[in-house]
Image (spheres, rainbow, N blue to C red):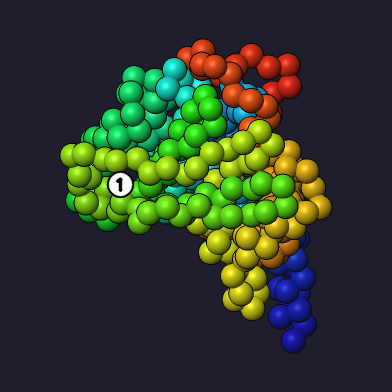
Amino acid sequence: MIRIRGRVRGLGLPSAVFFVVGTGVILHVGRTLMRELRQLRRVAAAAQNALLRPLPSRIEGLDVAAAQLAAERGAAIGGDLYEVVATEHGVRAVMGDVRGHGIGAFGTVAAVLGCFREAAYDEEDLGGVLHRLERALDRHLRREYPASVAEEFVTLLLVEIRADGEMAALNCGHPWPYRLSGTRVEQLAPADPYPPLGVFPLPDVLSTVGLGYLPPGDALFLYTDGVQDARDSRGRFFSLSTALTSAAREESLAPQAVLRRVRRAVVDHTSGTPADDIALLVLRNGACMPSGARGTARTTTTDPQPTTHL
């Protein structure tokens, strides 16, 4: 019995040394991994900001605000996309939602946005823009996903706001926008949408649909379906129309105010953890539209409105 205790006591020092050394190694590895994780997040945020470039607060008479909420906790990269540009044909906006989210959707977002930023200026009508986007997406998917190209798709909404406030749109499987006028909130759904891009070939001839007019003071609210599909802990869906009505009644229709109200409502409803990526875009006619767009991607502003990643 004495001999056994001596052996136990004899093993105490080496065990303590191994424990201390092991703990030190674990702590060092943990700190290294945390530094690398923070660096990766900074890189992801920089990449996202370069892709979804911050929008100015005003584009050709329109007050603008946009925000994104990524589904993956701590992630800066999502699968939603949006852009607003001023062209000689009017102000053109795109809102889209790539199947899936996170890093896997990033390349598809880049392909669609890159094409839109060129086609929006080159094409006389939205149908030409949409056909360009379809071809760009097809090339990307065949290159990146040759074995499963049929399983990849993008929902997309193209909107054009002309000099007199008249709006036209093309919709590929995307939620229709809302128009906010004073305290009135109305979802615009003038026609059945085309299928999402990548599911079936588009018709050769695409006819835009009218969304009516956007008079001075009115706002157009674009979003991805992660908003309307958001659920609380009891499985109840988020009511976007209720949130917009509340925003219209309690806030001005300033895009930032509307955005904050809806964003806060979504985060509260989902306890900060939505199941899908969310993107929001508000365009308000801040005054009478100018007689013609200057054809620049972004007008000069002293009050830039950065994209908000939540």
Relative to 207, say whether 262 is above or below. Answer: below
Q: Residue at x 35, y 33 (%)?
A: 126
Front-lying residue, 210 or 105: 210
- Asked if residue 140 can be seen in this view, the reply is no
Task: Determine which residue is flagged by label 1.
Answer: 197
Q: Position of residue 77 (x, y in %)?
A: 53, 42
Q: Is residue 157 visible?
A: yes
Identified at 45% across, 54% down, the residue is 189
287 sits left or right of 163 in the view: right
Q: What residue is shown at x 49% (from left), y 28% (from top)?
A: 162
Task: Say if 153 sits above or below 51 in the image.
Answer: below
The answer to whether residue 255 is above or below residue 98 is above
Element on which disc 1 rests? loop
Quadrant position of residue 244: bottom right
Q: Residue furthest right?
A: 250
Q: Residue furthest bottom?
A: 1
The residue positioned 59% from the left and 70% from the top of the image is: 237
The one of 197 and 109 positioned closer to us in this rendering:
197
State the image coordinates of residue 193 (x, y, percent, origin top left).
Answer: 35, 53
Number of dots carrying numbers: 1
Q: Residues within 10 Å of mark 1 (few under 14, many from 20)?
A: many
Q: Quadrant of the N terminus?
A: bottom right
